[in-house]
Amino acid sequence: MVMFLGGIALILTAIGAAMVIDGNSLGVLLGPSSFVLVFFSTAGAAVMAYGLSELKSIPRVIVAALRNAPPDLDETVTTLASLADVARKEGMLALESRLEEISDPGIRQALQLVVDGMEAEQVREMVEIDLESVEKRHQFGISFFRSLGSYAPTFGMVGTVIGLINMLQNLSDPSQLGIGMALAMLTTLYGVMLANIVFLPVASRLDRQNDAEIAVREAALDGVVALQGGISPRLLVERMETFLPPERRVGYSVRAGRTSPAQEAA
């Protein structure tokens, strides 16, 4: 959320600075009627395009976009390393008592199926079905804000055309032509700004969060299935760390707390 709001602040600062450098007043960018036309027309198009049940979930989607951090694959690997140690010493059924301690939903879901006695292929099939469902839910939020990002500039142009029509109806007063043209162009500005400062960035954040969550949960599924097959903790960590960039591959000993990253590197 801090980065998102910081980005908005940076954009607005850049626009304001450019206006001041050119010797213009920031007041020329204020047009309540233009904002009302663009914002509420865009909202109206969204209401037309989506159902009520979908629109009710938008507040939750916005909170997720601003607050949720992408899942940490590194933490998932460390958790699986710990679970592999337990499975090696106490057996797979001992992992059932650890389910409530696991915060990673991908590991918890797959591990629950394993301790329930399901075969590896059945575990993989059920988790993949759930992942498809999760991705479909995520795609709604992404498509919603992308739609808003396409509607807003269009309604900005609609406002500009309306402004030009009003201006052309008052050609008898040449002194008002400049003001009328400025107000007409302001709606286009608001449409473009809302799309590129709010709607499309939110869609991009949701898209990245979706990709990260799906990737982590797929990796967790692979790790749990390998764990079910009896893989050793060390080999499991080596297998899981292939999903990480080289600089984040620290090895089994570090993840098990037996050595520090510095000792491992040495």
Image (cartoon, rainbow, N blue to C red):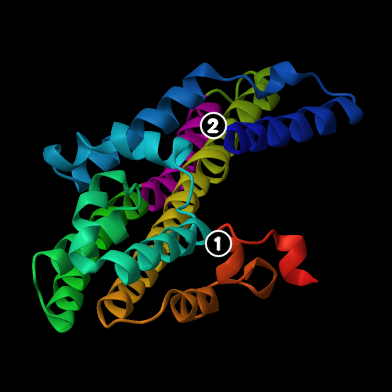
Asked if residue 242 lies left or right of residue 108, the reply is right
Which residue is at a point 15% across and 65% down the rendered structure image? 115
Nearest the viewer among 137 and 162 is: 137
Q: Can residue 217 be seen in this view?
A: yes
Q: Where is residue 134 in the image (x, y as percent from the top left)?
A: 24, 58
Residue 22 in magenta?
no
* Secondary element at tag 2: helix
Check disc 2 and report the residue beneath it.
Answer: 168
Circle 1 packing at 10 Å, graded few (<14), some (14-19), many (20+), is: many
Q: Where is residue 135 in the image (x, y as percent from the top left)?
A: 28, 61
Q: Which amino acid does label 1 sit on?
A: Arg
Q: Measure how far apart labels 2 and 1 are at the Cα level.
A: 72 Å
Q: Classify the position of the C terminus by image quarter.
A: bottom right
Report the magenta residues as a range.
145-169
User: Is residue 128 shown above or below 150?
Assistant: below
- Tag nearer the camera, 2 or 1: 1
Check disc 1 and report the residue beneath it.
Answer: 255
Asked if residue 179 lies left or right of residue 230, the reply is right
* Secondary element at tag 1: helix
In the rendered structure, find residue 110 and report the number of the disc placed on it: none
Circle 2 packing at 10 Å, graded few (<14), some (14-19), many (20+), is: few
In the picture, residue 84 is in which quadrant?
bottom left
In the picture, residue 143 is in which quadrant?
bottom left
Count of numbered marks: 2
Nearer-N-terminus badge (2/1): 2
User: Is residue 183 shown above or below 121?
Assistant: above
